[in-house]
Image (spheres, coloured by chain):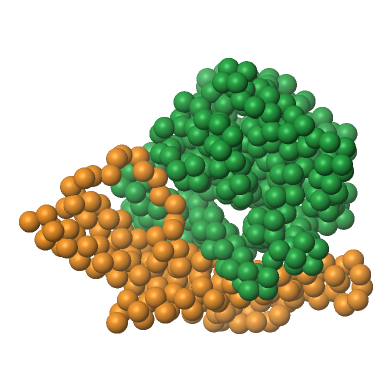
Chain colours: A orange, B green
Amino acid sequence: MIKRSLESLCNLLRVLLAVLVGALIIPVAMQVIARYTGIIPVYLWTEELATFIFVWIVMIGSVVAVWDGAHFDVQVIPESANPLLLFFQKALVLLLVGLFGALFAWYGIEYAKFGLIQHSVMMNANLIVTHITIPIAGLLWAVFCLYRLYEAFTQYLSTKRATL
Amino acid sequence: MILTTGLACSLLVGGFILLVILRVPVAFALGLATIPVVALDIRLTPFIIIDRMFQSYNSFILLAVPFFLLAANLMNSGKITDKLIDLARVLTGWMPGGLGHVNVAVSMLFAGISGSSTADAAGCGKILIPAMIKEGYDRRFAIAITACSSVMGVIIPPSILMIVWGGVMQVSVGALFLAGAVPGLMIGCALMATVYGFAKVYNYPIAMKPTFSSAIKAFKGAALAMLTPVFVIFGIVAGIVTPTESAIIAAAYSLFLGMVVYRTVTPREVGVILYDTGRFASISLFAIGTASIFGWLLAYYNVPRLIIELITDMNLSSFGTALVIAFLFLFFGLFIDAIPTIIILGTVLLPVALQADISPIVFAIIGIISLAFGLVTPPYGLCLLISASIGGMNVISVLKQVAIILLPMLLILLLVIIFPEIALWLPGKLMPNSFN
């Protein structure tokens, strides 16, 4: 049930990510078209909008990559054959990333509030639209890591049962 | 309390190394390593750190990264890579070790369009590694040459790393593109010479003897794709388009070729390509944020100044300093992705290079070539991991071949250090105003 909900949430984020990459093309393409063809006027807000979309892409992509375990890590020492050691290693990594997420979510709220009292130069948009990505991403990293930690634990238990 | 430089540096660097050993993803390890420093030093707050990270994404030039990746993904999905391979076959397939040469040549062509080494390794490797194995090439050689040739993606313009470098260190991206061209071509030639040596020793066959009609067909097939570097590189160098605009033109053009001209990309596939692009780009770009806070803290505690003093005390010549710089980039490139390394190490070493009278452009090219080696060396050699996975072998099994192929490439790096004119000649001729 929880896994299905989180997977659905992640699928929604995947769709949103694809849509945002597609959407990113529009303001930058408008700049190019305006500058070189004159078909449309030069809109100054396009650069700002592109940067806003870019921030969302980076943050959503980082969340999806946490769920998929796709952030790059480096295997310096060989993986332990001992299931308990392997579980501890995985658990420690997930706890640390989850801690980073929790701190981001907590302090990100203050940052989002700071965005709330600011406006962008060109579009006069309230900057909460981008600053809010910080606590959202932090919260989702933490939640996804917690669930992956639970999965790692159940996997360890089933491995242990199988070896007995 | 107020942390001393030594303590802050130990906490940052030591913490980062420990976290990487524990297999914490590099992007998060960079961020996590800053927590003890921020917690202990009363002058720092989490707000400052989050703001630093957030501001690093507020860069229009970085938008070029997803667009160049999009262009590369569209090329791979739209069978444009196949057209480039056909052209490379005609151009180089007649030499002993034909498919090895084709592998190198197609990487050079691909590098001229996409700017992404990993996309090159994945796109070309999928076709050429099985083809080479089928024609009797040693599997390990097929994997190694695919991985090593793909590094030209970030050296031959356009290059994602050069765009990031230019954006972070305020160097003309156009001048960097031009500076990378000659060393990139030299590395291509060095790789072909190595393939020739392997072919002679192991008696590898030629791929094909091109006929006039096959040559015309291959040139016609790849001609439209080969127009991309023309408007990307010349557009930037001539100051007509910005790197970000050139990237979107490349992506739009690749989409046009895939959907309209070759009709190999369906609207449904576009969605998948957009998602893949967003996911891969965001993994690299997210690390920019955490690397920025790590790098900013190093600068806050005056670490760059200490390194300058350390190297000045060593009384090194420009050549010696350049060697040290190359070594540091090579070493860090083994463990960290190229983009965060540029942000952390590049910004720390730039003043060192300037102090030693090394041109910022030569410094950039030395850094980028050195980091390119990191793409094929374990434990963090992404291109090697991709190629080994396609070839169905463990990375460790192909290290000997990789080491042999890397030797002539290292020689080219050494030549660039000894003769910086190799990098400076082209920008000096075409963009003399971009540097002094």
Q: Is residue B264 visible?
A: yes
**Relative to B424, residue B379 above or below:** below
Nearest the eye: B109 or B116 = B109
**Relative to B230, residue A54 above or below:** below
Quadrant hosting residue B260: bottom right
Nearest the eye: A58 or A11 = A11
Which residue ends up furthest to the left in the rendered image?
A164
Quadrant hosting residue B423: top right
Residue at 55%, 76% in the rendered image: A16
Side of B344 where A51 appears, left or right:
right
Residue B310: x %, y % from top left: 50, 27
Residue at 61%, 82% in the rendered image: A126
**Relative to B141, residue A127 above or below:** below
Nearest the eye: A72 or B252 = B252
Residue B388: x %, y % from top left: 48, 41
Q: Is residue B60 visible?
A: no
Residue B127: x %, y % from top left: 61, 46
Residue B379: x %, y % from top left: 42, 39
Residue at 57%, 48% in the rendered image: B126
Labels in figure, total = 0
Which of the image's four quarters has the C terminus of chain A? Answer: bottom left
Side of A148 where B87 appears, left or right:
right
Which of the image's four quarters has the N terminus of chain A? Answer: bottom left
Nearest the eye: B365 or B203 = B203
**Relative to B254, residue B208 above or below:** above
Side of B211 where A143 appears, left or right:
left
Residue at 27%, 55% in the rendered image: A90
